[in-house]
Image (cartoon, rainbow, N blue to C red):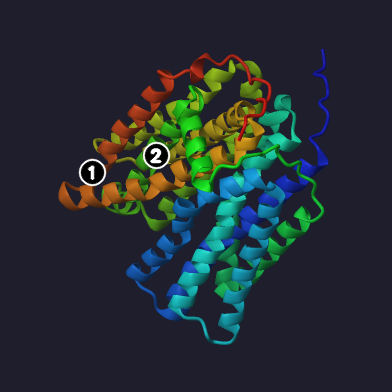
Amino acid sequence: MSTPRRDPLPRAFTRIAWSSVTTQMAEQIALVAVPLAAVVMLGAGATETALLQVAQTLPFLVLALPFGLIIDRTSPQRVLLASELLRMATLGTIVMLIALDALSLGALLVLGFVGAIGTVGVSVAVPSSVPRLVASARLMDANRWLELGRSTAFISGPILAGAIVSATNASTALVVATIACAAAAALLIRLDIPRSAFSTRASAWSDVAHGIRYVMGHRLLRPMIVTSTIFNIGWFLIQSVFVVYALGRLGMTPTTVGIALGAYGGGMVIGAALSGPLSRRLRFGLVTVLGPAGGFIAATLMVTTLWVPASAFAFASFFLFGLGPVLWTISTTSLRQAVTPAPMIGRVSSLVVVSTYGARPIGAGLGVVLAATVGMSWCIAAAVIVFAVQLVVVLTSALPSVRELPALASSVTR
């Protein structure tokens, strides 16, 4: 018996999906080209590149929640388009400054911060748009395509950037990223995303607090936020020392370290491809457990290298670190979109962004403290404990009991 053919996803979603792939590609190219420009053209050292990372991540912590409220009060479309245009403008400005031989570290820090504001806007607005365009029965399909595109960009973007910089220079790579942002913005013009029925006389802070209380009081949303936070602490605890650990303890070379990072991207792509078949064959709640379970197994493989320093364990670990989170993201994003009332989807999506990106410097900072005090091996050992905790959080929550994706939630007062 043949499987019934499913109707295509709405055209408006398709345009957002292609825009998302294009902007993710631009972001990955810029993440390679901008630090290279700082080092090669400005002679930046480790401190300066670290400051650049701070500038490019700080907006996620301080602006994600305000963006969520703006989306709830206005429209994701405006935020999407404005964010893409902002990213295009900042990248174009860097290119212009390079051409005029006027680029400075201060300008790069400011433009990196401003460009990251656009990235925050896109990160919050895209998942907020999906449930306004796609029926609840197709949320898994829609989010699977978004994650497949993101995973592809994570693999091809850095490779493309490296090839362009090697053949020409960082400026050319930034021109390509600027053009990609312009193409992403063009796909969003004349896009019709329905607005939510948001109505409130409360202050902005009151509405933000209302969103936080709603999430932390929800039996499904709360464990999503907590698990995402703990997972990213553990992941960046490993990331903070992996290169030094791999080169020193595992005897890996820069080439094999690159292969390990490539295995991470490969796991992302395969996870996105498998999410469809798995969601059709397994109970929905079980699918949500696969990601945290994969993270715990990956951490266990990595901690095994403390006794058996084989690079194969590191390759397998990074592969699972890529595969597990994609399965988690697709399933929980779909569930979050289904159970969150439309007037609150922006604030709820922004809290996920805060929990994900806000946990990363915590994990990296913990790695710095442990490596400096008791040694980097303890970072690897501590990570497996952190990943065990996030798995316990999921297993003891209501998530595994969810049998199928529910219908979209109704509206709330604000």
Quarter holding the C terminus? top right
Residue displayed at 48% across by 71% down: 110
Q: What residue occupies the far left of the structure in this picture? A: 373
Residue displayed at 44% across by 51% down: 61
Quarter holding the N terminus? top right
Residue 27 disc label: none
Amino acid beneath label 2 = Ala
Q: At which x and y percent is residue 59? A: 48, 57
- In 3D space, how far apart are the residues under numbered discs 1 and 2 (Cα atoms)? 18 Å
Q: Is residue 275 above or below residue 145?
A: above
Q: At which x and y percent is residue 278? A: 61, 23
Assess disc 2: are there few (<14), some (14-19) or many (≥20) residues with their C-alpha within 10 Å of its C-alpha. some
Q: Is residue 340 above or below residue 40?
A: above
Residue displayed at 39% across by 29% down: 297
Nearer-N-terminus badge (1/2)? 2
Give the camera-side residue of 218 and 220. Answer: 218
Q: Is the C-beta separation of discs 1 and 2 under 8 Å?
A: no
Tell me if 125 is positioned left or right of 166 in this view: right
Q: Secondary structure at mark 1?
A: helix
**Residue 332 quadrant:** top right
Amino acid beneath label 1 = Ser
Q: Is residue 177 above or below residue 379?
A: below
Assess disc 1: are there few (<14), some (14-19) or many (≥20) residues with their C-alpha within 10 Å of its C-alpha. some
The residue beneath circle 2 is 312
Q: Secondary structure at mark 2?
A: helix
Residue 377 disc label: 1
Give the camera-side residue of 222 and 395. Answer: 222
Residue 36 shows in this picture: no
